Amino acid sequence: MAKLWYPVIDYLKCEECGSCLKKCTHGVYDQSKAPSPVVINPDGCIDHCHGCGNLCPQGAITYVGDDTGWNPPNGNKQDFEESCACCSSTDKKQLNVDFLFLDLNTCERCMATDDTLNEAVDELSPILNTLGVNIALNKINIVSPEMAEQFQFISSPTIRINGKDICIEVKENNCKDCGDLCGDDVACRVFVYDGKEYNQPPKAMIMNELLKAIYIPQQTSTETIYSLPENLEKFFNGKAASSCEGNCSCS
Ligand code: SF4
Ligand code: SF4
């Protein structure tokens, strides 16, 4: 098991063929989302395995922690050859966008944020590509307190650009859908943009943050000691209790 090795999907390249989900037998991908690849269990990924990346026809998969010199065999390699025929590295700047969420089946807030993020990235990508900037969009379903800790997850949904939360502070209000999922009262993220609060981030907010990440020097975030917010603890406990249906002694 590898804590620092897991696949990252470039959703702008992915054509949802489902090959990566079929290939992996380690529960890394959420099979219920097939053929769309959503990494649900990064800890399950086997250190230095390139199994899904080698199969991807679009070269859409890279790996966090990969220091092997491996290149995606298809799309990325082709891009690289097209972008520069005479040197061994591309000049492209990379924006890593992480979308972290609790649920994409029931929670309207997470689903709407996912849709808006996709639209923002789709619209900006061609322009940024011309400017020599590549966007890699990574979607991570946080399914346990352990994953929450690993990703320092404090509120759902979260969008980070190059590791930095697009929200300056955590604001939340009651989320009926997540409450229904866990059988308790749960609060989820509220996005503040131009002095107003939204249950899903306006597209303009995401686009602004992407552009800021390119043109305004970003402060490196200081490391903080993580503790699971009470709100998320309630969510995971409630979900676990509702899924065991009284067949164990966890209650
Ligand atoms: S690299 Fe291997 S273990 Fe990791 S997700 Fe891909 S196929 Fe599964
Ligand atoms: S193999 Fe590549 S193109 Fe196919 S679903 Fe996975 S990431 Fe997308």
Image (tube, helix red, strand yellow):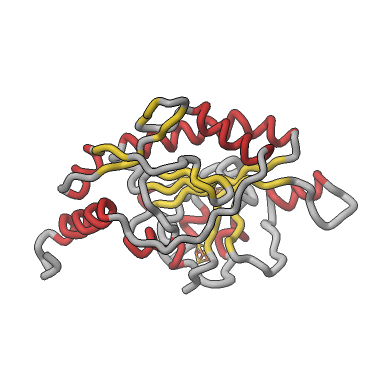
- In depth, the one of 219 and 32 nearer the eye is 219
**Position of residue 170 measured from the top left corner of the image (x, y, whole percent):** 38, 43
Q: Residue at x 75, y 39 (%)?
A: 132
- Is 204 on the left or on the right of 77, as rendered? left
- Is 231 on the left or on the right of 95, as rendered? left
- In depth, the one of 90 and 199 nearer the eye is 199
Residue 17 seen in render: no
**How many tags in the picture?**
0
Q: Residue at x 53, y 48 (%)?
A: 164
Q: Residue at x 44, y 67 (%)?
A: 44
**Position of residue 232 measured from the top left corner of the image (x, y, whole percent):** 28, 53
Up the image or down, 21 lies above or below 186; here it is below
Which of the 4 quarters of the picture holds residue 173? Answer: top left
- Is 236 on the left or on the right of 51, as rendered? left
Which of the 4 quarters of the picture holds residue 207? Answer: top right
**Position of residue 72 measured from the top left corner of the image (x, y, whole percent):** 67, 57
**Position of residue 41 measured from the top left corner of the image (x, y, whole percent):** 41, 61
- Is 12 on the left or on the right of 225, as rendered? right
